[in-house]
Amino acid sequence: MSPNEFSQRVLGWFDAHGRKQLPWQENPTPYRVWISEIMLQQTQVETVIPYYQRFIERFPDLRKLADAELDEVLWLWAGLGYYARARHLHRTAQILCEQHGGTMPLDIAILQQLPGIGRSTAGAILALAADQHQPILDGNVKRLLARFGAVAGWPGQSRVQTTLWELAERYTPVQRVAAYTQAIMDLGAMICTPRRPYCAACPLAEGCAAHAQGQEMAYPEPKPHRKRLVRATRMLLLRTLEGEVLLERRPPVGVWGGLWSFPECPLEVDIAAWCQEQFGLTVVVKPPWGMIRHNFSHFQLDITPVPALVSGPAGVVMEGERFVWYNPCHSTDRGVAAPVKRLLAALATEL
DNA sequence: AATTCGGGGAA
DNA sequence: TTCCCAGAATT
């Protein structure tokens, strides 16, 4: 789809369905658009509206904001979050009053140097309030463009970000930039929603690469969850001839603190020798079971269960605070971790 | 290049 | 619970 057709479709949709009654859309001066853009960073429209109205009523222009106490600005901001935004707003108002004659500079490079104004916000101010040919790239537009172009990768990566900016530049028209900018954001917020996008109502569906693949939800790719550390361990299923299995109470602190679990044997040592040394038990080691993967919030534990038969006297291990011979068929609840519970259940059915 | 700032709303 | 939201500054 050509850039011209893209923007024409977006504008056509906007004329019929776009939002045109938002508070900052009436009398969209650079100052009012600036305030709204800052408030709308990472904050939803419905949340912003009452804050915006109070803020504009108290600080109707740049000078009033610059002359105010920071505390009052912060007070009006309370509840919006990201309070650095309020500090930057106040500071920028003072800078503009001292160095720019109390007016908003309509220059992308100057705007971007002001506290709290990055490329997208600067572009939005100039596009919406001055109809300048400037692209924006907020969360809604990122999602829409990532789908339209089937842009692979997580938008948090700088390379993906660069690609999306290039798309934003390509499709931003020269005419009617203000309407287009509002429209592309509205499309992202109302049609190209994060879940269940309304492709049937989308004017861009025809040229949308993700839609063509039937893979709208595959873009943009989610943030890759932090690489969890992988730990591996062996859990020994030491069984007596009577079918009882040895459980050990874990230390009170750390993972599964105080819960009962199987003895864990280091990976590199010989199991039979280790059992003799640790417990005085003579065992016959059997082939290991399939690995069990257990996920914690901060790491992943790969458990290899190793069954072994106690061939000598089991009584050498004294039951008490730390050890117990446990019959897996009698589900006397002992407080065991989830994977241990699975293994106990497997032992019970094996009998 | 990855983290941080944050409260609110939706699924 | 998790994810996401009209992002920018900081390390």
Image: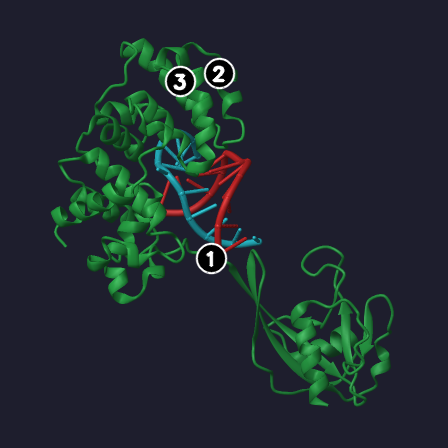
Chain colours: A green, B red, C cyan
Residue at screen point 70% across, 80% down:
A345
> Which comes before the other along the chain, label 1 or label 2?
2
How crowded pointer 3 is (Cα within 10 Å; few <14, some 14-19, many 20+) is rated as some
- Residue A242, given in percent of the width and then of the height, sits at 81, 89
Give the distance between the C-alpha atoms of the residues marked 1 and 3, in whole angstroms.
Answer: 39 Å
Picture disc at residue A49: none
Does residue A351 appear anywhere in the picture?
Answer: yes
Residue A344 position within the rendered picture, expressed as x and y whole percent measured from the top left:
71, 78
Say which residue label 3 marks.
A91
Left or right, C8 with respect to A316, comes to: left
Q: Quadrant of residue A240?
A: bottom right
The amino acid type found where label 3 is placed reads: Arg
Alpha carbon of mark 1 to alpha carbon of mark 2: how far? 41 Å
Residue named by callout 1: A227
Please name whichever residue, A208 or A346, is drawn nearer the observer in this view of the structure.
A208
Determine the secondary structure under disc 3.
helix
- Would you place residue C6 above or below residue A331 in this image? above
Amino acid carrying mark 2 in the image: Leu
Q: Along the line of sight, which residue is nearer the eye, A298 or A215?
A: A215
Amino acid carrying mark 1 in the image: Lys
Q: Which mark is residue A70?
A: 2
Q: Chain of mark 3?
A: A
Q: Secondary structure at mark 1?
A: loop
User: Element under label 2?
Assistant: helix
- What is the x, y in percent for residue A42? 42, 38
First in residue order: circle 1 vs circle 3: 3
Look at 20% across and 45% down and name the residue there: A12
